[in-house]
Image: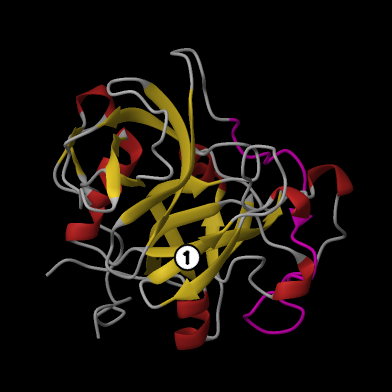
Amino acid sequence: GPLGEMDLTKEYSSPFIGKGNNRQPKQPLISTNRVYMGIVKAWYSTQKHGRIECEEIRTATGCDVYVYQDVLTRGQAGVGDVVCFSVFASPRGQLQASSPLVRTATHLGYALTGIFRTGGPCDHRTDAGTIDCQELRRVFGIEARVSKEMGRGLIFGRRVAFNAYMNNQGKVYVVSVMEVDEGFQPTPGNLSVTYSMPGFQPADGPGSIPVVANNPAMAPKPSMVPMMQMGTMGMGLAMGNSGAPPMMAASASSGLGVFQLHGFGHRIV
């Protein structure tokens, strides 16, 4: 199939050459590693690790993916955020997410920023243009596509904030966007307190990590979440009825949440 095979025999290979300020990108992560999409479902502040739920990985292995504080911090991600990542098997046999992890959507407003372009590499029959985003380039090596409906009112060369998803072909599509000023920065995920999504149960056996009581202050607001559903082209968007900027998160009543993420893995060969 288009997703290829899951290879967990090797640890993630860094996409950078050099160290510190001398690091330079080698090639996008997706060109050498499988990339999966999932939702950060739990964070345990005392243990300094959390869980990412990816349906593809759950189906294949029966496990969730561990993610440690440094990886989430670099990706500015927290509970309820949609993330794309690569995995490796630790010496203990745990599946772990590696950097670079990119947060593509958040319930805290917008996950990413970039520059809107027209005439970029997209299908101009359906797309208004693309967004050039450094974080997406590191992982996917491509720009995020903006539909004509989503791109109304956007001006070439202006800075925008946006949420996006990866489809099963490794393409990135924008699902909400807004022009912002140069000083705008996405709100990072909150890793200061322990929290798990309502209804989340770890998938690697009962009692391995306790399900923590939810912190209402961190709970995403369901009325502000766009509903994404699987379709013939991967995932489609059905917007909620809120007038606020679209938010993305998971709810207690629907397993993976109001949008059914299948954790698409993709590798270009």
Q: Seen in the image, is 102 located left or right of residue 38?
A: left
- Main SS class of the magenta portion in the image: loop
In the image, what residue occupies the spot 35% across and 20% down?
158
Q: Is residue 204 magenta?
A: yes
Look at the image and tell me whether residue 262 can be seen: no
Residue 161 location (% of width, % of height): 47, 31
In the image, what residue occupies the spot 67% across and 41% down?
191
Q: Is residue 144 magenta?
A: no
114 and 7: which one is in front?
114
Decide: is 6 above or below 172.
Answer: below
In the image, what residue occupies the spot 67% across and 84% down?
205
- The region drawn magenta spans 187-210
Q: Seen in the image, is 60 located left or right of residue 229?
A: left
Q: Residues within 10 Å of mark 1 (few under 14, many from 20)?
A: some
Q: Seen in the image, is 221 located left or right of residue 30?
A: right
Question: What residue is pinned by disc 1?
Answer: 236
Q: Seen in the image, is 175 located left or right of residue 159?
A: right
The secondary structure type at the circle numbered 1 is strand
> Quadrant of residue 91 in the image?
bottom left
Decide: is 132 above or below 221.
Answer: above
Residue 157 location (% of width, % of height): 28, 20
Identify the image's colour scheme: rainbow, by chain, secondary structure or one colour: secondary structure
What amino acid type is highlighted by mark number 1?
Answer: Gly
Instruction: Please state, as top left, top right, bottom left or bottom right, where the N terminus lies in the image.
Output: bottom left
Instruction: Please state, as top left, top right, bottom left or bottom right, where the C terminus lies in the image.
Output: bottom left
Residue 153 location (% of width, % of height): 42, 28
Look at the image and tell me whether residue 37 can be seen: yes
160 and 67: which one is in front?
160
Total numbered labels placed on residues in the image: 1
85 and 233: which one is in front?
233
Residue 231 location (% of width, % of height): 44, 75
